[in-house]
């Protein structure tokens, strides 16, 4: 379909600083931040009196932007669940990397672990799921084909 391009994806978290730090620790880049509220926001998201803080991060090349937000109002639910990889809904995001093992080591040094194991997927990719704060899952995929 003409005129459609990817802009960003959004995540709602309880601890904005921890969620942003997870991505920064793994080499992502902070692109900006804002505090938003007002009638326009209420109308778009269907909530009254909304007020949120948000930070934009992306891969170093500027691709795959993510809007990470924490709602101040209305007060978010105090509890959340860390769901398994097969739970319904958006469960992970994926980025290609040059060296999965190096990213996993960097993640471990920052206190994050794998959901499972790093595996070879049909000699096409080496894949690993890294679990971040609040159940965020980042898939890192290293292409194995020639010229990648």
Image (tube, rainbow, N blue to C red):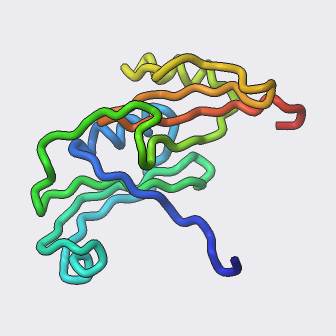
Q: Residue at image x 54%, y 21%?
A: 104
Q: Residue furthest right?
A: 146
Q: Where, quadrant-wise, is the C terminus in this rendering?
A: top right
Measured from the top left, where is residue 131 in percent x and y?
Answer: 42, 28
Q: Nearer the viewer, residue 3 or 80?
A: 80
Q: Residue at image x 27%, y 47%?
A: 13
Left of 42 or right of it: where is 146? right
Left of 90 or right of it: where is 64? right
Q: Residue at image x 55%, y 17%?
A: 117
Measured from the top left, where is residue 15 in percent x and y?
Answer: 23, 42
Left of 19 or right of it: where is 128? right
Q: Is residue 61 above or below residue 112?
A: below
Q: Is residue 89 above or below residue 102?
A: below
Measured from the top left, where is residue 38 in percent x and y?
Answer: 19, 78
- Choose top left, top right, bottom left or bottom right for residue 119: top right
Measured from the top left, where is residue 140 in percent x and y?
Answer: 59, 33
Q: Where, quadrant-wise, is the N terminus in this rendering?
A: bottom right
| Number of marks present in the image shown | 0
Q: Residue at image x 56%, y 47%?
A: 59
């Amino acid at each position: 379909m003409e005129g459609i391009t990817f802009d960003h994806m959004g995540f709602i978290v309880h601890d904005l600083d921890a969620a942003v730090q997870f991505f920064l620790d793994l080499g992502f880049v902070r692109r900006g931040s804002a505090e938003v509220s007002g009638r326009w926001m209420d109308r778009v998201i269907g909530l009254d009196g909304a007020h949120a803080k948000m930070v934009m991060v992306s891969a170093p090349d500027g691709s795959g932007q993510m809007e990470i937000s924490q709602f101040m109002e209305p007060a978010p639910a105090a509890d959340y669940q860390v769901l398994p990889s097969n739970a319904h809904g958006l469960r992970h995001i994926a980025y290609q990397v040059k060296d999965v093992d190096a990213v996993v080591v960097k993640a471990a040094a920052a206190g994050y672990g794998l959901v499972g194991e790093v595996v070879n997927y049909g000699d096409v990719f080496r894949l690993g799921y890294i679990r971040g704060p609040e159940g965020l899952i980042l898939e890192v995929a290293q292409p194995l084909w020639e010229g990648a």
